[in-house]
Amino acid sequence: MDFRFDWRLVEFDDDGDRVTCRVEHVPTGRVETVEAAYLVGCDGGASTVRRQLGIGYEGTADLASFVSVYFHGKEKVVSSILTGGSL
C-alpha cells in the first residue's frame, strides 16, 4: 500500500488489468504516474474517483476533514504518521 499526504488524484484510467493514476504533489505541483491493480475511492464526498466514474452524490460534500487508517500486518508496533508515536 502507498499512503501519501499532500498528494491529490488528478485522473485515472482503468484498462481492465490495471489502473493508471496521475497524482499531484500539491505543495510543489509535481505530477507522477502510479500504476496499481486496484483503485479504492476513499476520498470523501468531493471524490475525484466517484465523479470520474459518473456516480452521483446527494448532500454536503465537505462537512469535516479527518484521516483514519486501520492496518493489520505482521509487526505489532506501527509508527503513527500523525503523532510521531507508536500505536
Image (cartoon, rainbow, N blue to C red):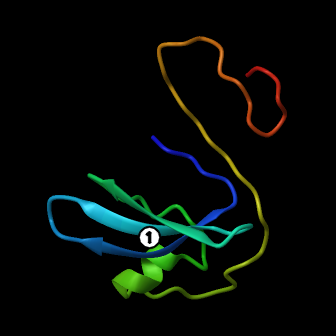
Q: Residues within 10 Å of mark 1 (few under 14, many from 20)?
A: some
| Residue at horizontal 56 percent and vertical 46 percent from the top | 3
Horizontal relation, residue 22 to residue 75: left or right:
left
Q: Amino acid at mark 1?
A: Arg
17 w.r.t. 56: above or below:
above
* Image-quadrant location for residue 70: top right
Of the 4 image quadrants, the one containing the C terminus is top right
| Residue at horizontal 22 percent and vertical 59 percent from the top | 18
76 w.r.t. 47: above or below:
above
Which percent across, then down, holds residue 66? 75, 57
Is residue 55 visible in the rendered structure shown here?
Answer: no
Is residue 31 visible in the rendered structure shown here?
Answer: yes
The residue that mark 1 highlights is 22
Horizontal relation, residue 33 to residue 26: left or right:
left
Of the 4 image quadrants, the one containing the N terminus is top left
Which percent across, then down, holds residue 79? 70, 24
Mark 1 residue element: strand
23 w.r.t. 67: above or below:
below
